[in-house]
Amino acid sequence: NGVLSLLLAFLMFAWFCVFVCASAAGQTMTGEPRSVPVNDTRVLTAARFAVAEFNKVNAGETFAYKTVAITSAKIQVVAGIKYILDMLLGQTVCSRSHAAADSEPCAFQSRRKEYQCHFVVVEVPWEKSRVLSKNECHQNKS
């Protein structure tokens, strides 16, 4: 009976330590979206992917778009990592067929169109998979 009580106390202490360590380290718990800095390298990678996909599906556009600003970023751990991004995109001088519109060489047009976008990128690192699961954009009226 004493051994069982000691074992139970040890297990409770171990779970308490796991909880405290995860909280103190700022780890994202499964299922709960957490705000992260918009300049986090993982966020920037997901944002570049989202913009590349945006440019692919907007066949009616002559010019490519690139990031003006990431206004909000959240990460949610699910069966992979979900990046929830709110972004402002601006029209560039580069054609849509330009491979890397979201990089330095593509300048913004002086009188550019802009889109406010809500993207969700789901990444499963162990499967080397990344998908744009939500692409909701509306044009900003100037």
Image (spheres, rainbow, N blue to C red):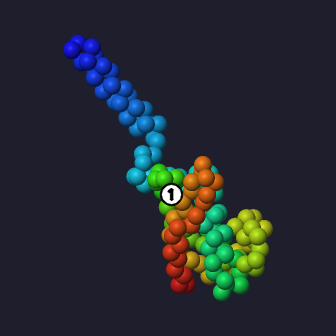
- Front-lying residue, 111 or 124: 124
Q: Where residue 78 sits: x, y (%)?
A: 46, 53
SS state under label 1: strand
Image quadrant occupied by the N terminus: top left
**Of all residues shown, which one is farthest toward the bottom?**
60
| Residue in view at x 64 percent, y 54 percent | 128
Specify whether 125 is left or right of 96.
left
Compared to 2, does 127 lie above or below? below
| Residue in view at x 61 percent, y 57 percent | 129
Compared to 140, does 84 lie above or below? above
Q: Where residue 39 sits: x, y (%)?
A: 59, 54
| Residue in view at x 55 percent, y 84 percent | 142
Badge 1 amino acid: Lys
Residue 73 in sight: no
- Front-lying residue, 114 or 57: 57
- Front-lying residue, 134 or 34: 134
Residue 121 in sight: yes
- Residue beneath disc 1: 82
Q: Where residue 109 sits: x, y (%)?
A: 70, 79
Specify whether 56 is left or right of 43.
right
